[in-house]
Amino acid sequence: MKPVMNAFTKQQELWNQIFTESESYFGEQPSMLAQKSLELFRENNVCSVLETGCGQGRDTFLFAQDGIKVTALDYSPRAVDEISAKATSSSLSSCIDSRCFDIRKPLPFDSESFDACYSHMLLCMELTMAEISCALSELHRVLKPSGLAIYSVRSIFDRHYRAGEHLGENLYEVGKFAVHFFSEDKLRGLASGFKIKSIERIEEGALPRDLFCIVMEKCSTRYAPTFESCFGGNSQTDNVPFARNRAHYHCPGGT
């Protein structure tokens, strides 16, 4: 098994390199999930969205161009700088607040701050089930009552499932990337405090990637791990390594 990696070292360096070498690594057009999400945002009068794992902003700008205020988080400084520059040049700075942030830490926002939360393929990165559950608990906290949570992950039907080095849980190293794969049952187990409105499978990209897209509505108290319960109340997790060789905490839906 390879040495422990850290969110602010090798994986971050990899994404910074990728975003430096390509101005549109995932393409210039918004994702299918973003286009479907925008329809839901319009139907539900969404005015503010927290986007985690925004990358180079292909979905961020779709939402902002529709007048939605987007707080866009990514742990790649390169990606955040690109979004800030693009927002300024396109006169969308008032609608886009881009910040460098690691989702394995408590979100720096008040409870019930956003109408919706959105994340495309972030939660299938090198994160343990406990960390994913804690991140979802934070999204639940910052959502307004009945707010929407929409995210996508790689599915166990993906061609790369069980390919490459096994890193623990359903994590595999595919090329230089660590990818977490999900079953539908696993996703349902993570939904405490939410009402699942839909779970849909789609294919995206040239590979293609096989994705689950989940739409949920905040509906009740969430009974799931939080960062405090997992890390003993210490929110300073800068030195917490990525999933390799890391202790696994129990969480709903975990395997």
Image (cartoon, rainbow, N blue to C red):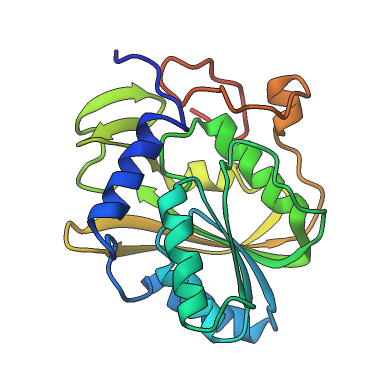
- Left or right: residue 123 versus residue 219 is left
123 over 172 or under it: above or below: below
What residue is rendered at 72% in x and 34% in y?
226
What residue is rendered at 46% in x and 49% in y?
77
What residue is rendered at 58% in x and 42% in y?
103
Quadrant hosting residue 180: top left
Q: How many marks?
A: 0
170 or 81, nearer to the observer: 81
65 over 151 or under it: above or below: below
Q: Which quadrant is the N terminus positioned in?
A: top left
95 or 32, nearer to the observer: 95
Residue 206 position in % (x across, y down): 17, 62
Q: Is residue 112 visible?
A: yes
What residue is rendered at 53% in x and 84% in y?
91
121 over 65 or under it: above or below: above
179 or 199, nearer to the observer: 179
Residue 183 position in % (x across, y down): 41, 44
Residue 156 position in % (x across, y down): 32, 44
Q: Is residue 36 visible?
A: no
Residue 143 position in % (x across, y down): 74, 60
- Left or right: residue 161 versus residue 47 is left
